[in-house]
Image (cartoon, rainbow, N blue to C red):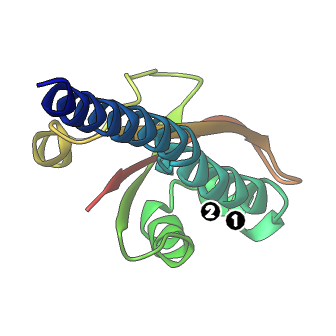
Amino acid sequence: MVRNKRGWLRIMEATIAIMILAGVLITIYSLNHQSYDVSESIYVIQEEFLDDIENSYEHRTDVLENETEILQELADGYFPSYLDCSVIICNLTGEVEPCKLNETIYLSVRDKNLYVSQTVIATNVESYSPKILKIYSWEV
């Protein structure tokens, strides 16, 4: 009878050892497995786009003249295929309206994560008419 109890005891010890080892391995794996945060890379792309606009006389002029289509084409070239974006130009003087997405785009992206960056373009050599340039991005 004593021998049968020893066998069960060894089986229990082996089971407990396997459970402890599995727990340690799962813990180590979960600490090393970090999820990739796409928001940081999206903000980097947006900031590069805005910096290029700020540093280009031609593109600053496009902002000041409300050339949204030209800037949208430029922005589309910056973003990878898994992202979509929308460029918005808003006035800072005169009739100031809320600087937001148009309703159609908003309704199509309202269930998605939306990433927004902006800059102010105030002047070029010929004119002073400050504008806000916003770039909205989301995953397709």
Give the amino acid at mark 2. Answer: Asp
Measuring from the top left, give residue 25's x and y in whole percent: 47, 44
**Quadrant housing residue 83:** bottom left
Q: Position of residue 111 (x, y in %)?
A: 15, 38
- The residue drawn where x is 53% and y is 22% is 94
Q: Quadrant of the N terminus?
A: top left
* Position of residue 32 in the picture relative to residue 2 (left or right): right
What residue would you read off at disc 1? 59
Asked if residue 62 lies left or right of residue 123, the reply is: left
Q: Can residue 132 be seen in this view?
A: no
Q: Name the residue under label 2.
A: 62
Secondary-structure class at tag 1: helix
Q: Are marks 1 and 2 in contact (CB under 8 Å)?
A: yes
Q: Where is residue 12? Give x, y as percent.
A: 25, 30
Q: Residue at (23%, 42%) from the top-left corner?
A: 112
Three-letter code, disc 1: His
Q: Is 55 left or right of 10, judged from the image as shown?
A: right
- At label 1, counting other C-alpha atoms closer than 10 Å, the crowd grade (few under 14, some 14-19, many 20 or more) is some
What is the C-alpha distance between the residues marked 1 and 2?
5 Å
Is residue 13 visible in this depiction of the protein? Answer: yes
Question: Which residue is most to the front?
Answer: 1
What quarter of the picture does the C terminus occupy? bottom left
Q: Nearer the viewer, residue 56 or 76?
A: 76
